[in-house]
Image (tube, rainbow, N blue to C red):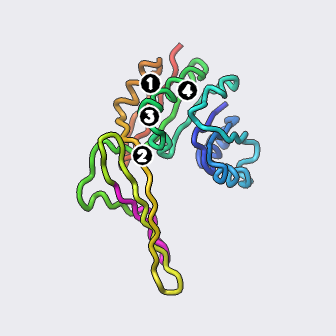
Amino acid sequence: MAIDLGAGNGIQSIALKNLGFQVTAVDFNKQLLEELKSNPSAEGIAIKLEDITNVKAFAKLNPELIACCGDTPTHLESKEQVEQLLIDSTQILVDNGNIMLSFRDYTYELKDEQRFIPVKSSSDRILTCVLEYEDEKVRVTDLLHENFNGEWTQKASGYYKLRLAPVAVIEILEESGMKIHFNESIKGVCTIIGQKSH
């Protein structure tokens, strides 16, 4: 049994299902879960509309894997909330169960033009992220340029993410009885896998 926290439209959930897991996909975003539900590849995945911080509500599932990927941890309100989520997750894992996390490492501040990050582009759409660093969080502004009938328009939206230090996340997991088996950062995205000791 695997629980996918912050499942969204199910990229990880479907991959876990294809690996042979029974999967419960958890997210508070109804629209994204509807996308997952309508995907033929998601057949058999249990879909739960729930705040991921209520992970203890799924203790009876006896999960052998809890995944929280796609930068989901940085979207929580505070580092204390992340810590509690990790503690609760490790508590409901079966012995030798695994937790898998992935999140963008914002601990090192990008400067000047480095703060402008191209995300996606096509002939009629360009998405760029702009980062503004604060002590505990980073403000992300999405700039979307779209071309309609030869004219470009711009839409902007902003939100905050936590500046999570991978070393601090590992420390929480180890203090919760997890042994770290994988810790790697690729292009600024940190992936950590820990296993619950007896």
For the magenta stretch, what is the residue range?
119-131
Q: Amino acid at mark 4?
A: Ser
Q: CA distance from mark 4 to mark 3?
A: 14 Å
What residue does disc 2 label?
161
Please state which of residues 194 and 89 is positioned toward the viewer in this rendering.
Answer: 89
> Mark 1 or mark 2: which comes first in sequence?
2
Which residue is at the far bottom?
150
Q: CA distance from mark 1 to mark 3?
A: 10 Å
Task: Please check the rendered image and state whether residue 122 is part of the magenta-colored stretch, yes or no.
Answer: yes
What residue does disc 4 label?
89
Residue 149 x %, y %: 53, 86
Residue positioned 36% across, 43% down in the render? 137
Residue positioned 34% across, 40% down in the render? 136
Residue 140 x %, y %: 40, 54
Q: Amino acid at mark 2?
A: Lys
Query: SS of the residue at dot 3?
Result: strand
Q: Are marks 1 and 3 in contact (CB under 8 Å)?
A: yes
Task: Please check the rendered image and state whether residue 19 is part of the magenta-colored stretch, yes or no.
Answer: no
Q: Are marks 4 and 3 in contact (CB under 8 Å)?
A: no
> Mark 1 or mark 4: which comes first in sequence?
4
Q: CA distance from mark 1 to mark 2?
A: 21 Å
In which quadrant of the rendered view does residue 57 lie?
Answer: top right
**Label of residue 86 in the image:** none
**Quadrant housing the N terminus:** top right
**On screen, residue 151 above or below 101:** below
Dot 1: within a 10 Å radius of its alpha carbon, few (fewer than 14), some, or many (20 or more) residues? Answer: many
Q: CA distance from mark 4 to mark 2?
A: 21 Å
Which tag is nearer the camera, tag 4 or tag 3? 4
